[in-house]
Amino acid sequence: MKLLVVGGGGREHAIIKKLKENPEVEKIFALPGNGGIAADAECVPIGAKDIPAIVAFAVEQQVDYAVVAPDDPLVLGAVDALNEKGVPCFGPTAAAAQIEGSKVFAKDLMKKYGIPTAAYESFDDAAAALRYLDTAEMPIVVKADGLALGKGVIIAQTREEARQAVISMMEEGMFGQSGSRVVIEEFLTGPEVSVLSFTDGETVVPMVSSMDHKRARDNDQGLNTGGMGTVAPNPYYTEAIAAQCMEEIFLPTIRAMKAEGRPFRGCLYFGLMLTPKGPKVIEYNCRFGDPETQVVLPLLESDLLTVMRSTTEGTLAQTEVKFSDKSACCVILASEGYPQKYQSGFEMTIAPEALPHAFVAGAKLADGKLLTSGGRVIGLTAVEDTLPQAIDRAYTLTGMVHFENAYCRRDIGARAMKAFKEA
Ligand code: AMP
Ligand code: GLY
């Protein structure tokens, strides 16, 4: 079988390594992939948003199955375009990807179908948004409607900060078109849990839960990043909470999307907050999360390709999806300065022992050497019997990777350990 994976980060590397475990897979193309992914797939310099070129390549190479991993091409209709040419594909259509592509769409869907989420108002007029803020309670959360590279959410402690967020999004065009509409919502509190799920539009199978670490620095200080590390499972996500989420959130969402004529197939990511009033949806993503995927897929014991194809073919209910009961920890090595200004182009070495655990996010190949090329450079994942062992081993693995200006958080998993002790 010939496969094609669209994207080029740590998530895609984790997907590709898992797909390769299937002996029927002869070849994987990564579009565009990266210098680290090149060890596991043939990288083709086609951008993840260049849908006509992706489709032309898939047709020319007669690929048997495609996986579209990032949000942008999904929202832009990559799956629709591939399907039109007869290429079967993992991921939602553009209509279904709106669940991430538009926060207004997602919030209105939850309101209509009674799915628990933060109370909110949406605005397409800055003056009305500002008037609303005059009497709203602080803190409050201001969100750009569209995709904004994970930066479109501002938690405002004061009225002035909230006003500034509205002005920069709606009047100064900080996120372009994505900020022309905003959602202003209630500030919630509680532990956060990421639950990725497989769904074929009828059946939904949650994967093992995970915990992201979004801030750049230890103790959740510093700026928001794409994620500096993850652990799985998430100790806050008990069996009782999982059952409640299935009844109140997962199944209602899948049914709602079907009822709206936008059946969701692929990976639906539920970003949850376990509030004192029960689990609520903070956000939906129409794709695998990164770096969540780097802990979740190493724990998957079933064949990923079989599971993915069952979501396309509508046979998920008859397909086994089994996860290990071990624990996983992923620590991201980033370029010092990320998520703001950072230098790259430094040579990276990875000890052979760490290679099977390494998911490369930002590196390119030059004369046979790996050079850093991004903010997040590499994720190192350990799977062990217990969480403390996994954390320990993941940090040992980071010591086997070298490049100038590398930094990582030293406390990935610490919050999860604390939760275990409290329980
Ligand atoms: P996002 O960019 O959608 O992943 O959101 C970034 C982060 O903002 C989330 O992981 C939460 O920590 C936080 N957040 C989003 N919405 C809320 C909310 N209504 N209340 C409190 N925190 C929130
Ligand atoms: N780690 C959060 C995300 O992928 O959006």
Image (cartoon, rainbow, N blue to C red):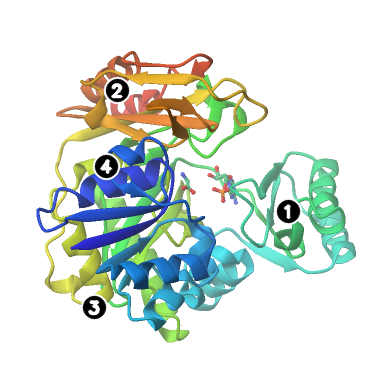
* Front-most of residues 25 and 114: 25
- Residue flagged by tag 1: what amino acid is it? Phe
Neighbourhood count class around disc 1 (C-alpha, 10 Å): few under 14, some 14–19, many 20 upward:
some
Which secondary structure lies at badge 3? loop
Q: Which residue is tagged 2? A: 394
Residue 414 to residue 173: above or below: above
- Apparent side of residue 141 relative to residue 162 in the rendered image (left or right): left
Q: Which residue is tagged 3? A: 314
- Apparent side of residue 74 relative to residue 158 in the rendered image (left or right): left
Q: Which residue is tagged 1? A: 175
Which secondary structure lies at badge 1? loop
Badge 2 residue CB within 8 Å of ligand 2: no
Which secondary structure lies at badge 4? loop
Mark earlier in primary sequence (4, 2): 4
Q: Are marks 4 and 2 in contact (CB under 8 Å)?
A: no
Q: Which residue is tagged 4? A: 40
Marks 3 and 4, how far apart at CA: 29 Å
- Residue flagged by tag 3: what amino acid is it? Gly
Marks 4 and 2, how far apart at CA: 21 Å
Marks 2 and 3, how far apart at CA: 37 Å
Marks 4 and 1, how far apart at CA: 35 Å
The residue positioned 50% from the left and 74% from the top of the image is 94
Mark earlier in primary sequence (3, 1): 1
Q: Position of residue 207 (x, y in %)?
A: 26, 53
The image quarter in which residue 310 lies: bottom left
- Residue flagged by tag 2: what amino acid is it? Ala
Q: Are marks 4 and 1 in contact (CB under 8 Å)?
A: no
The residue positioned 30% from the left and 24% from the top of the image is 421
Mark earlier in primary sequence (3, 4): 4
* Front-most of residues 129 and 381: 381
